[in-house]
Image: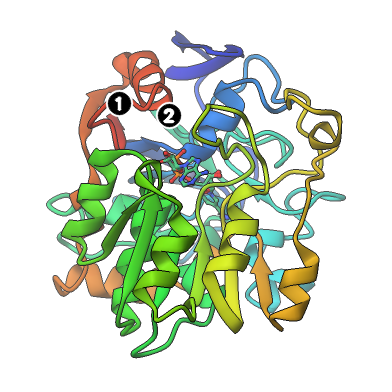
């Protein structure tokens, strides 16, 4: 089969690799119809992880079930399914509690499993013609009859829509509240959409890329361009000096300042400043225990200055971690089906799988207008 293979930093190509196949009775085999490039893929693409060469990438996948193992009885051949990026077993302590992002079985000794990702188990990704789905009865979300018609929307259930929603859940965004979201990438934009869904009043989105800030505006959020003045001050000015009720971090450890200097933690510390005393902050941007490519020694160990004094003094709280996609994706699927959510509006490019390397390069370079790239094998 054809698949997007990682060969080293900024070096990916679509190669011929052995076909994905059923390996266990609980597996299903999916013919991929749409698979996305994610900001999380860029951590590997930029060489920030120890992902092995030869790995097939891709954790935002949907497609048609073409074969199931003997132990699969809920999911049927012919079903159109979207696959949560986390692989869970369904029976460990964490899966039982709904914390499927932290499955203890699918990637023993580590925090959670995913398709095509560094340190998240031996699973290949779906930027390919075929994908093996473990524990398929648990992991495949079956889609309604309009699956193909609304493919651009449903594929977002694999990651960024539930992840954006998770940010607002960790922050406990409620009706009538003000929310500030750091980052107008796909995840930040989905957090803005989710904040609206939860009845937030004012939604601010901070970034410095005008194309992405325009999308935030289309989602009825107030764009805050931090290249045009201190973002914290802009939020304080817009909230009578109090700060926003809630905050969401959707940038991650690769945050940069205006000089292009890498500043992991800059966004967290800004949120502490921009959220009101006793407010909550949800962190879905990725932070890692080790960042071998980091510019300073502390950051190499995944550490950064955390403004704990202000955080404590303001009595704030913070929730963190990978999204437990399964906790939200049925409910969000139903809203897409009823026409109440259209996350596909942020899609900027739909490419053939063979153009994947070009998609990676342009998305990574943050070329103007390259907001979200979908690949069709
Ligand atoms: P992205 O890289 O496309 O978007 C990040 C955005 O942050 C960009 O628009 C960039 O201009 C902006 N940015 C960079 N530094 C900034 C700063 N100092 N202030 C304000 N904005 C700044 O990525 P994405 O796909 O939107 O993902 C965002 C983060 O979410 C990544 O770290 C990704 O790995 C993570 N993620 C987490 C989960 C999860 O389950 N927790 C799932 C998916 C993605
Ligand atoms: Zn993703």
Place of residue 168 in the rendered image (x, y in percent of width and height, measured from the top left): 47, 73
Q: Is residue 178 above or below residue 357?
A: below
Pointers 2 and 1 in contact (CB under 8 A)?
Answer: yes
Q: Quadrant of the C terminus?
A: top left
**How far from the left and from the top, in percent, is residue 188?**
41, 55
- Secondary element under disc 1, as helix, strand or loop, is loop
Q: Secondary structure at mark 2?
A: loop
Picture coordinates of residue 21, whole percent (x, y): 53, 32
Instruction: Pick whichever, 315 or 215, lies toward us.
Output: 315
Give the vertical position of 267 relative to 52 (above or below): below
- Quarter of the image with the N terminus is top left
Residue in the foreground of this view, choosing between 90 and 348:
348
**Residue drawn where x is 66% and y is 71% of the image:** 319
Q: How many marks?
A: 2
* Rendered location of residue 106, percent (x, y): 73, 51
**Residue matched to label 2:** 127
Q: Which residue is mark 1?
A: 377
């Amino acid at each position: 089969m054809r698949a997007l293979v990682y060969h080293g930093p900024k070096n990916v190509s679509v190669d011929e690799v052995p076909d994905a196949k059923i390996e266990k009775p609980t597996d299903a085999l999916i013919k991929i119809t749409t698979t996305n490039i994610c900001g999380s893929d860029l951590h590997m693409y930029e060489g920030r992880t120890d992902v092995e060469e030869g790995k097939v990438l891709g954790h935002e996948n949907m497609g048609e079930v073409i074969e199931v193992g003997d132990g699969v009885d809920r999911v049927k051949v012919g079903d159109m399914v979207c696959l949560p990026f986390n692989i869970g077993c369904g029976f460990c302590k964490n899966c039982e509690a709904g914390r499927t992002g932290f499955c203890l079985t699918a990637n023993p000794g580590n925090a959670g499993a995913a398709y095509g990702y560094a340190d998240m188990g031996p699973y290949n990704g779906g930027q390919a013609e075929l994908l093996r789905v473990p524990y398929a009865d648990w992991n495949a979300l079956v889609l309604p009859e309009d699956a193909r018609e609304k493919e651009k929307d449903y594929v977002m259930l694999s990651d960024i829509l539930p992840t954006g929603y998770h940010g607002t859940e960790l922050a406990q965004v409620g009706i009538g509240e003000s929310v500030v979201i750091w980052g107008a990438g796909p995840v930040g934009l989905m957090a803005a959409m989710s904040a609206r869904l939860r009845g937030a009043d004012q939604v601010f989105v901070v970034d410095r890329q005008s194309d992405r800030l325009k999308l935030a505006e289309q989602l009825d959020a107030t764009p805050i361009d931090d290249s045009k003045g201190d973002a914290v001050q802009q939020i304080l000015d817009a909230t009578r000096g109090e700060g926003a009720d809630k905050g969401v971090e959707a940038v991650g450890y690769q945050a940069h300042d205006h000089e292009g200097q890498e500043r992991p933690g800059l966004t967290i510390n800004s949120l502490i400043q921009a959220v009101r005393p006793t407010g909550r902050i949800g962190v879905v941007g990725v932070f890692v225990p080790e960042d071998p490519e980091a510019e300073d020694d502390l950051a190499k160990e995944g550490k950064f200055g955390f403004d704990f004094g202000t955080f404590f003094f303001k009595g704030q709280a913070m929730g963190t971690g990978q999204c437990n996609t399964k906790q939200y994706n049925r409910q969000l699927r139903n809203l897409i089906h009823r026409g109440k959510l259209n996350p596909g509006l942020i899609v900027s490019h739909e490419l053939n799988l063979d153009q994947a390397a070009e998609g990676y390069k342009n998305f990574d370079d943050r070329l103007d207008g390259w907001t979200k790239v979908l690949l069709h094998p």
